[in-house]
Amino acid sequence: MLVIAEITVDKLDTGRFISAKVKEIRAAVGSGTAINALSGGVDSSTVTMLGHRALDTRLRTVFIENGLMREGEPERVVGLFRSLGVAVEVVEARKEFFAALKGLTDPEEKREAITQTFYKKIFGRLVRESGAKHLLQGTILTDVDETVAGIKRQHNVFEQLGIDPQKAFGYRIVEPLIQLRKDGVRVVGKALGLPAELFERIPFPGPALAARVIGEVTSERVGTVRTATAVVERRLASLKTFQHMAILHEDRVTGMRGGKRDFGYQIEVRCWDSTDAVAATPTDVPFARLRRLADRLTSEVPGVVSVTYNIGSKPPSCIEAV
Amino acid sequence: MLVIAEITVDKLDTGRFISAKVKEIRAAVGSGTAINALSGGVDSSTVTMLGHRALDTRLRTVFIENGLMREGEPERVVGLFRSLGVAVEVVEARKEFFAALKGLTDPEEKREAITQTFYKKIFGRLVRESGAKHLLQGTILTDVDETVAGIKRQHNVFEQLGIDPQKAFGYRIVEPLIQLRKDGVRVVGKALGLPAELFERIPFPGPALAARVIGEVTSERVGTVRTATAVVERRLASLKTFQHMAILHEDRVTGMRGGKRDFGYQIEVRCWDSTDAVAATPTDVPFARLRRLADRLTSEVPGVVSVTYNIGSKPPSCIEAV
């Protein structure tokens, strides 16, 4: 197994790190072209900036619309990078993702379906069509740790799992952020010109809103958790926590509307204090604010009758439920 | 439909109420005998005291051990009533209840299975064997309201549902508390000599811990929520809230133990402020206390990796999840 030399944020010389990685990317890609998928999160945004600094127009950046993104996300991300001089191409793939997710309830099977659809189907096709032989990827050290420990099956650490991405998917992965953790990535992203709005973004999982739906991931259920996520992000953004999220449960609970029984949905809100996602504790949000948030969720998200707030820590909990 | 004249707690003349109800019970039962089932909750405990005042040994009080009770409950209830001079007979029926609940996940079907097992099977048999023609029952006005509104299918309001209990089950139901709400019952229970420990008890639902398990009710799953309930009651009793509870979810969530992924259980804690259970808001428990509670639950209840706290209000939530 590859041993990765961690660069902690206090040891990080940002300027040197960036020029070293620019050189590494140029050396790896040579005179060829590269491709990368931008999700709009901190990691993939930082890799996009780093890649364009190294390769300019020889890097093609795509945003795959998988139907699992947050409200207004594709437009927001494309507009933001356009203002930074980076062209991002939106690839429509909603039908393919929901078809792959149909009937699946096991979290591992869901992740696997998204991974396979993303890499093998959509991205593999794009890479073959583009002629690019290199994929830039925003893997960070925490992803590697969690995958090695068997906690998560990360989609972006094939090499650490002993899978040869060249054999499996037909291209090579370049991972310039693999020595960093989230705090280091934020510093690098800022130095590369990402606006505060983006480099300060709370982490968002690879499978996007599919990771926020317990049970089957359908277009309707993603719609429910997308609306809930927008409410939670709007109401809790000013807290500046490490991460906050809405999770749609599969369990139905008893509620009442208009004096009648209404067997409805439950949304779980999680809000984490953490520096590196390895350990995390729930944020002490003032209770009046949590109650107002619950009122917003039950009135603005169709079908929701119950709202809970996570009070467990990681470990033994994980940050995401799925 | 029968119109019931509510007696609010501020209008309640406790002494007059008790002597009127004692007379009514004597008039209804005549020279015969009666039987009642004691669960250990406020309502059935108050009815037991009222019934024994009216009928003395002509009332037979049974405690049906359905396997769905809280930790140490049968022993506690029997001992307490023995100290009040009331003999309570424990009837073993665990196997019959779990057999009836096997494979059921729908809350209504679960309630119905418990109702049928309780009334038709166990209680019907006891009544037939005892020769008693009257059943004393602790129905209160809130039960009637919620059943009429279609929010809940209460097991103890046959008449309000248009079901003739004499035809259906072979006996008559006497409901001396039907004009009261929970606060009124507490006042009456205290006047009848119930100890603070009992008349101040938080409400506990008819289907007992089966109402605290989302999904199938097995002996193992009831065991999990029984342990969680004991932890929650021990940790939150001093808050003197209207009600507090632990709910075992059917949804499984990702956790980690010993550095390894552990797909485990989630416990939801609910703690309600209310006067009459018609409307309720979640209690503002200090966050440090909630976090300690979550730590206790994940360390003391096998398999639990995640704990949430309810932040929604009734309505649109209900007090119980199932």
Image (cartoon, coloured by chain):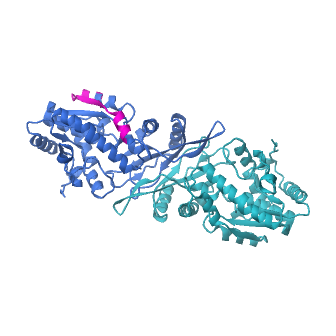
Chain colours: A cyan, B blue
Name the quarter where the N terminus of chain B is drawn.
bottom left
Residue B84 vertical placement versus B14 (above, below): above
Residue A139, relative to residue B60: is it above or below?
A: below
State the residue at coordinates (81%, 67%).
A130
| Snapshot quadrant of residue B222 | top left
Query: Could you tell me which residue is drawn at 88 percent across and 60 percent down?
Result: A29
Q: Is residue A206 visible?
A: no
The residue lying toward the viewer, choosing from A134 and B244, is A134
- Residues rendered magenta in the picture: B79-100
Is residue A23 something one can see in this rendering?
Answer: yes
Q: Is residue B166 left or right of residue B108?
A: left
Q: Position of residue A311 (x, y in %)?
A: 54, 46
Residue B166, horizontal then vertical, whole percent:
17, 46
Q: Position of residue B246 (x, y in %)?
A: 44, 43
Residue at image coords 60%, 50%? A107
Q: Is residue A93 magenta?
A: no
